[in-house]
Amino acid sequence: MTASSRLGLVRGWRGDRWRGGPGTPSPARGARRGGTAPTRFDVVRDVIRVESVVYKMLDKSAGYIKSKQFSSSTGAETEAAMTDLKSQGAVGWVLEPQDTRIAT
């Protein structure tokens, strides 16, 4: 068993093709199911920022803040959410960290 097969990498995968900073094009090829031959195209690297906090007003005085995931920006995003909700009239908050649903 090779390192590639243990990691589930496709045979012939070359990770060095995918290096570079945002805006760097990387050559790739792929085929659709039922397609005839692989198509060549460029994948352009970029930084994708995902909000880690969502929030809304529940009523005239209560705000709701949920952490979708934890990252280095979660604290600052939570603080910004509290400031925005306070400006909308919130005097209390319901905080929900990540996914707290109970499996049944």
Image: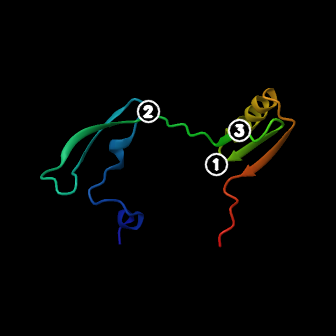
Residue ID at (31%, 59%): 10
- Circle 2 sits on which residue? 21
- Give the mark toward the camera: 3 or 1: 3
- Circle 1 sits on which residue? 68
> Are the residues at dot 2 and dot 3 in contact (C-beta closer than 8 Å)?
no
Quadrant in the picture for residue 61: top right
Q: Secondary structure at mark 1?
A: loop
Q: Position of residue 11 (x, y in %)?
A: 28, 60
- Give the mark toward the camera: 2 or 1: 1
Quarter of the image where the C terminus is located: bottom right
Q: Position of residue 90 (x, y in %)?
A: 83, 34
What crowding class fits label 2: few (fewer than 14 Cα within 10 Å), some (14-19), or many (20 or more)?
few
Q: What whole-number distance in Å separates the C-alpha atoms at marks 2 and 3? A: 35 Å
Q: Position of residue 95 (x, y in %)?
A: 78, 48
Residue ID at (26%, 56%): 12
N-term mark: 3 or 1: 3
- Circle 3 sits on which residue? 56
Judge by depth and name the residue closer to the eye, 37 or 67: 67
Check residue 46 in the rendering and tell me which mark sits there, or answer none: none
Judge by depth and name the residue closer to the eye, 68 or 37: 68
N-term mark: 2 or 3: 2
Judge by depth and name the residue closer to the eye, 9 or 90: 90
Q: Is residue 103 above or below residue 99?
A: below
Quadrant in the picture for residue 50: top right
* Residue type marked 1: Lys
